[in-house]
Amino acid sequence: MDEAPHWLDPVEGRAWRGMLRMHDLLVNQTGRTLQRDFGLSATDYSVLAELTRAPGDRLRIQDLAKVLGWEKSRVSHHLARMTKRGLVGREECADDGRGAYVVVTRAGREAIEAAAPRHVEDVRRLFLDHLTPGQIALLAEITDTVIAKNETSQ
């Protein structure tokens, strides 16, 4: 049973390509500032942001991988590089001898605290300032829906 592909119509294609292009532009522009001014890659910032949002500034590796949407091997490789730079460390999990936590170090905390104000300024200048409050609310609803549907299908 060979069915013809259900191609994207022009509006769907524009929405898909636009979302990808917007993501790339925003990540590249904010990432350049993070790297140039603070010595952090966009992925370093993402890791530090998720860890500092977590209780105790720490998460298990598999939980960090899930919240970032990365494969565990990608997280492990990136954490190894961040550990060498002193941004994160590892703590054994007291209640589970097999598990470990990734924790933000003092240097990691200082790095994100230095970078965050500029990063938020860039997010506003490059993205949020061009949208109405209604568009922002709708975009938040759209992203929540797509993420929830795709997380449950994995």
Image (cartoon, rainbow, N blue to C red):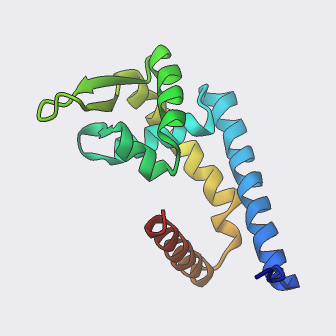
Q: Is residue 24 left or right of residue 119?
A: right
Q: Is residue 35 above or below residue 52?
A: above
Q: Looking at the picture, tell me which residue is in the foreground, 154 or 106.
A: 154
Q: How many marks?
A: 0
Q: Residue furthest top?
A: 84
Task: Using the image as rendered, state which of residue 16 and residue 124 is in the foreground.
Answer: 16
Report the side of 11 relative to 152 (left or right): right
* Image point (37%, 42%), residue name: 62
Residue 25: horizontal and vertical position, in percent? 77, 53
User: In the drawing, does residue 53 fall left or right of residue 147?
Assistant: left
| Residue at left offset 47%, top offset 30% | 76
Tell me: residue 77, above or below residue 19.
Answer: above
Q: Position of residue 56 (x, y in %)?
A: 23, 39
Q: Position of residue 96 (x, y in %)?
A: 16, 34
Placement of the N terminus among the 4 image quadrants: bottom right
- Residue 127, by quadrant, is bottom right
Residue at 45% x, 37% y is: 48
Q: Is residue 6 or residue 18 the one in the foreground? A: 6
| Rendered residue at 53%/29% (across/down) | 78
**Quadrant housing residue 98:** top left
Residue furthest to the front = 1
Question: Above or below — where is 100 with respect to 47?
Answer: above
Expressed as whole percent of the image width and height from the top left, the position of residue 150 reads: 52, 68
Furthest toward the right, the residue is 10
Image quadrant where residue 55 sits: top left
